[in-house]
């Protein structure tokens, strides 16, 4: 294993400290709870939007804290749900008169921790709700879930809900929008290589030199099937068809198309995938109105990508187009 | 410290100490059909409770129990943490900000704890879990209180009820947790969680002062 790492146990805290040091004045870091929050949060006139999950998916979610996106993120260790006291303490610190919305990817451990954190906060009079994200079409149940997993599509829920909250939407309205976006968002991933958690020091699973894992999860969990590596366009055909037929997306639909890198694939390859996905959708009469190519929700150093579609209407499109500021891009 | 807080301290401290002292025994029970980490997990979590004992917020018994629940659920791995932590948390939420707790309050807290476990674990009576000791025990406490038994007598009866109920899990097939993967093979051994409840209540009963506290 070749990684930039000091003490593997300090992988997450050191990353968070780096994020905090790089963004003085805009982000506040509370080391006790892995909490990264907007320095101007909470605001009494705005719903606080919080996401937490395991680490290892960066930029999700600590690096999308900013205006028009998240107010805070409280990640757990690599691929591990945050402990419930992180959720509770984060909710307490983000408490607003308008409420707190916790965005939770559908994994058993995350849901337990967030349910408990919410119940604790509620017992102290804090207004808080949970919205679950489950966009992965690959498998019905997985190693870590009952029901579908939440993967890269969480970006669109965060973006839409974040924009709505910034525009003054109340808690119920934020939940309505979040559910609506989640309901029209579908994703599937494919892995070319396994990922290596720093504390483990070796690949999480074995994948032969000429093999790919179709429908892989963002923690390296198994997907639909293991196959021989084929050319890029053929991989797009299979992944995209699984996504398109699931909702289904139909001729005449307008969509947002995301090609998300899983951490170890260069952006150039992501655009090769994008090219064919865009063309294939056009052939089916599906119009790509918003495009996203890059790393949004990764799996450490896994080579691979996922394809996400969001069916757009005027409301969703406007929320996705609204301006936002996050810490990870400096020009 | 109020009498109620002293009693809550005694009960929680005894639960924690019993979990730590029985790490190997509870682990052995679990290893028959589970994955054997139950004793270890429980001991590590309650060790944290003992470590931070003096610093736990005692504004009122409810707050104290909620804080204990947070420590337990955050520091015990797997599903045991959230399950056991939920029990303390729900009991604490039900106690609210009251400084004094009656027998009726305690029953309501135990009901909230078992309802919380059912919800968190998606489980119910008969699934071969700790609920199969906790619920019969709570039923017994409620009926003893109704017939006017004093606190020491209630606890003694609770210990007997929990032990009998835990032993009875031997005939059940596990439907939840790791043990459920073994299906029919889980029949013939007691449930580790239910037995842990029984052993803990027996220790609480032994630790309870026989007079001077009402």
Image (cartoon, rainbow, N blue to C red):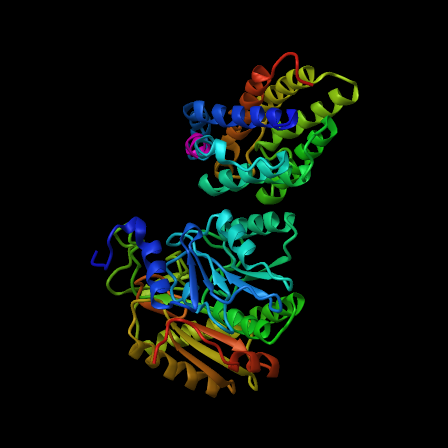
Q: Answer yes or no: is residue A213 visible.
A: no
Task: Classify B205 as above or below A246.
Answer: above
Residue A109 location (% of width, % of height): 49, 49
Which residue is outermost to the left?
A2
Where does the magenta region start and end? Answer: B37-44
* Rendered position, A83 above or below A106: above
The N terminus of chain A lies in quadrant: bottom left
Q: Residue furthest right?
A: B147
Q: Main secondary structure of the magenta part?
A: helix
Front-most of residues A2 and B103: B103
Q: Nearer the viewer, residue A264 or A247?
A: A264
Quarter occupied by the C terminus of chain A: bottom left
Q: Position of residue A29 (x, y in %)?
A: 41, 59
Is A59 left, or right, of A246 in this rendering?
left
Pick the residue in front: A260 or A243. Answer: A260
Vertical placement of residue B12 versus A44, above or below: above
Residue A167 image-quadrant placement: bottom right
- What residue is shown at x 55% (from left), y 34% (from top)? B174
Looking at the image, how many numbered discs can be counted on the residues? 0
Please tell me which residue is depicted at 47% across the width and 48% down the height of the picture: A83
Asked if the stretch drawn in magenta spans residue A48, the answer is no
Viewer can see residue A300: yes
Q: Is residue A305 left or right of residue A169?
A: left
The percent coordinates of residue A281 (x first, y second) are 47, 83
């Amino acid at each position: 294993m070749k990684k930039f790492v000091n003490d593997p146990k300090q992988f997450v805290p050191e990353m968070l400290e780096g994020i905090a040091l790089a963004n003085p004045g805009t982000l506040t870091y509370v080391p006790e709870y892995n909490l990264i929050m907007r320095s101007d949060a909470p605001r009494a006139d705005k719903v606080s939007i919080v996401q937490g999950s395991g680490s290892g998916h960066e930029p999700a979610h600590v690096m999308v804290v900013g205006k028009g996106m998240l107010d805070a993120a409280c990640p757990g260790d690599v691929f591990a749900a945050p402990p419930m006291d992180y959720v509770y303490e984060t909710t307490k610190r983000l408490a607003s008169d308008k409420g707190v919305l916790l965005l939770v990817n559908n994994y058993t451990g995350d849901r337990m921790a967030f349910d408990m954190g919410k119940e604790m906060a509620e017992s102290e009079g804090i207004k808080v709700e949970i919205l679950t994200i489950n966009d992965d079409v690959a498998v019905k149940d997985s190693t870590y879930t009952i029901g579908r997993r939440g993967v890269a599509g969480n970006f669109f829920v965060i973006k839409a809900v974040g924009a709505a909250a910034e525009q003054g939407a109340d808690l119920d309205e934020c939940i309505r929008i979040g559910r609506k976006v989640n309901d029209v968002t579908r994703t599937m991933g494919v892995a070319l290589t396994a990922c290596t958690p720093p504390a483990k020091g070796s690949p999480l699973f074995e994948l032969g030199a000429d093999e790919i894992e179709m429908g892989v999860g963002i923690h390296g969990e198994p997907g639909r099937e293991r196959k021989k590596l084929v050319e890029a366009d053929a991989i797009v055909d299979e992944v995209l068809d699984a996504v398109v037929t699931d909702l289904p997306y139909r001729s005449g639909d307008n969509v947002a198309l995301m090609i998300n890198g899983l951490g170890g694939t260069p952006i150039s390859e992501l655009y090769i995938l994008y090219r064919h996905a865009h063309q294939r959708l056009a052939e089916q009469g599906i119009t790509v109105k918003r495009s996203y190519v890059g790393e949004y929700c990764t799996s450490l150093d896994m080579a691979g990508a996922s394809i996400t579609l969001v069916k757009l209407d005027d409301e969703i499109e406007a929320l996705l187009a609204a301006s936002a500021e996050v810490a990870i891009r400096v020009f | 410290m109020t009498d109620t807080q002293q009693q809550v301290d005694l009960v929680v401290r005894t639960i924690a100490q019993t979990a730590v002292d029985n790490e190997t025994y509870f682990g052995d029970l679990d290893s028959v059909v589970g994955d054997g980490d139950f004793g270890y997990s429980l001991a590590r979590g309650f060790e944290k409770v003992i470590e931070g004992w003096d610093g736990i917020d005692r504004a009122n018994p409810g707050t104290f129990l909620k804080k204990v629940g947070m420590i337990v659920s955050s520091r015990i791995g797997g599903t045991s943490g959230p399950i056991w932590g939920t029990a303390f948390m729900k009991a604490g939420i039900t106690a609210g900000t009251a400084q004094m707790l009656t027998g009726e309050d305690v029953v309501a807290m135990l009901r909230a704890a078992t309802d919380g476990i059912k919800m968190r674990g998606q489980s119910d009576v008969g699934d071969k879990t700790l609920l199969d000791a906790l619920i019969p025990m709570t039923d017994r406490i409620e009926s003893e209180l109704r017939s006017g038994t004093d606190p020491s007598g209630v606890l003694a009866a609770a210990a007997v009820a929990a032990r009998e109920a835990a032993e009875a899990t031997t005939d059940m097939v596990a439907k939840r947790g790791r043990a459920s993967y073994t299906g029919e093979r889980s029949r013939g051994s007691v449930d580790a969680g239910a037995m842990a409840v029984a052993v803990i209540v027996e220790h609480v009963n032994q630790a309870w002062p026989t007079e001077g506290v009402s």
